[in-house]
Image (spheres, helix red, strand yellow):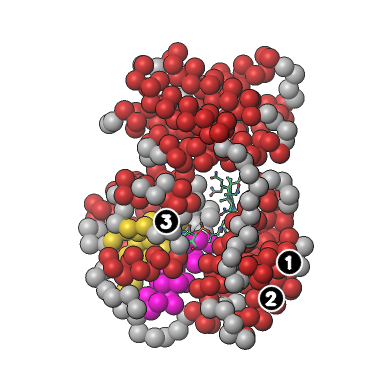
Amino acid sequence: MDIKSKVSLTLRDDKDIIVKSVVGDYESTGNISSAQRQASIRDAKYNIEYLASAIEIDSVVNFKSYVIWLRDILRTYNIEDGMLIDHLNRILDYVGLNYPSEFGNVVETFISEGIASVINDKGEEYSYLDSTSELAELASDFFNALIDMNKSKAVKLIQDVVEKEEVSIKDLYLNVFTNVLYEIGRYWAMRKITVGQEHFATAVTVYTMSLLYDKIFNSEEKEYKMIGVCVDDELHEIGIRMVCDIFELSKWDTYYLGANVPHSSVLSELKRIKPDILALSVTLASKVPACIELIGLVRRDYADIKIIVGGRPFNTDKDLWEKIGADGYSVDANDAVKVATRLVGGVYE
Ligand code: B12
């Protein structure tokens, strides 16, 4: 086992003790309620989990992205950046005091880069809807209908452009639904909308996508087969749903297995369906280790199946797909078809 794997394993095994030490210290420095203490413990566990995963997958970039995301969330609660920096330093101090020095060296690289990004990242306002795309106005109208919780308006906006054949399904997926969901996530993280609004927006988007299915699924002859799946414990399934739908439009026979699929179920479907491509989707960087594990299992039994990966951690760290032993990656669902077709020796039209 290499040093990074040892460190991440140790951090996970000792998570509770580390958190007790880090959060316990806070408790003794001020008055905090029991609810605040529980929230601190939960958040500190997430932080250790993300740190351990980032170390395991050797991706400082993903840890920095996580720390900036956390900083921005804490700011919405008026928690100063200094608190986060202090928290990260406490984790580092704990590792320095309790484990061999080479563990401290590994953790220090990640923590110091994380702290540097808290300080240096400007945290400028941005929007996923500020786009030069011709569909920016439609995306913005759809977004507003969702946060107003106006389901019929949202659905009608999309049905109208589809009926008039003004927009292709690929464009709707990539330039409307994806951007809108990213913006919904940003609004949720900035506490500009509630969890309920976020869940509603997600459900209406999935519903609207399903209304397009008679245009996606047809009985045309298919040349290749693919299975699309989210790794174990990963609940974000809309990205891989889009990937599957766009493969289907490109004359692939697709098998969308959805969210949170145990490794054993993926393996049994591989045996049954015998696809040319297995497409794995990950959104949370902390689930990349599960993806690595699954790739290892597939390689052992199904050497012929090509594996492509995609999702947020791979878009954040562009070298990650290669490091974890996948055959291909693409930033979005459209390019995924090109990559896969090339991998199976086909011609992309
Ligand atoms: C909807 C949503 C949820 C829903 C998901 C429901 C569902 N049916 O999928 C629910 C409520 C379950 C959820 C839960 C959580 N979520 Co959430 N969620 C989102 C949200 C708003 C949209 C996700 C989405 O569908 N995006 C649109 C799709 C199309 O984009 P995509 O997945 O990136 O896919 C594109 C590409 O990446 C690529 N692609 C994707 N997969 C693949 C695969 C292959 C092979 C290829 C080639 C390409 C490819 O193609 C796609 C389209 O072109 C995002 C915001 C965001 N930025 O994405 C937050 C977000 C991802 N969630 C977040 C968080 C924190 C969580 C929770 C931890 C919250 C909590 N405290 O409980 C949990 C974790 C649950 C879990 N264990 O997985 C954070 C993650 C932050 C981080 N630093 O990691 C985000 C970014 C929100 C935010 N801004 O803070 N979430």
Observer-nearest of 335 and 136: 136
Report the Cα–Cα distance between label 1 and label 3: 29 Å
Residue 337 tag number: none
Report the Cα–Cα distance between label 2 and label 3: 29 Å
Whether residue 38 can be seen here: no
Residue 206: give x, y in percent of width and height: 60, 67
Residue 328, quarter of the rendered image: bottom left
> Circle 3 is placed at which residue position?
310
Residue 198: give x, y in percent of width and height: 68, 55
Residue type for callout 1: Ala
Circles 2, 1 touching at the beta carbon (< 8 Å):
yes
Circles 2, 3 touching at the beta carbon (< 8 Å):
no
Residue at x 53% of width, y 21% of height: 89
Mark 3 crowd level (few <14, some 14–19, many ≥20, 10 Å Cα): many
Q: Residues in magenta?
A: 238-256
Q: Is residue 108 left or right of residue 32?
A: left
Of marks 2 and 3, which one's residue comes earlier in the chain?
2
> Circle 1 is placed at which residue position?
145
Report the Cα–Cα distance between label 2 and label 1: 9 Å
Q: Is residue 187 left or right of residue 214?
A: right
Residue at x 53% of width, y 53% of height: 235
Circles 1, 3 touching at the beta carbon (< 8 Å):
no
Looking at the image, is 289 positioned above or below residue 84? below
Name the magenta segment's main secondary structure: helix
Observer-nearest of 155 and 221: 155
Residue 220: give x, y in percent of width and height: 39, 86
Residue at x 22% of width, y 62% of height: 304
Mark 2 crowd level (few <14, some 14–19, many ≥20, 10 Å Cα): some
Residue at x 46% of width, y 41% of height: 62
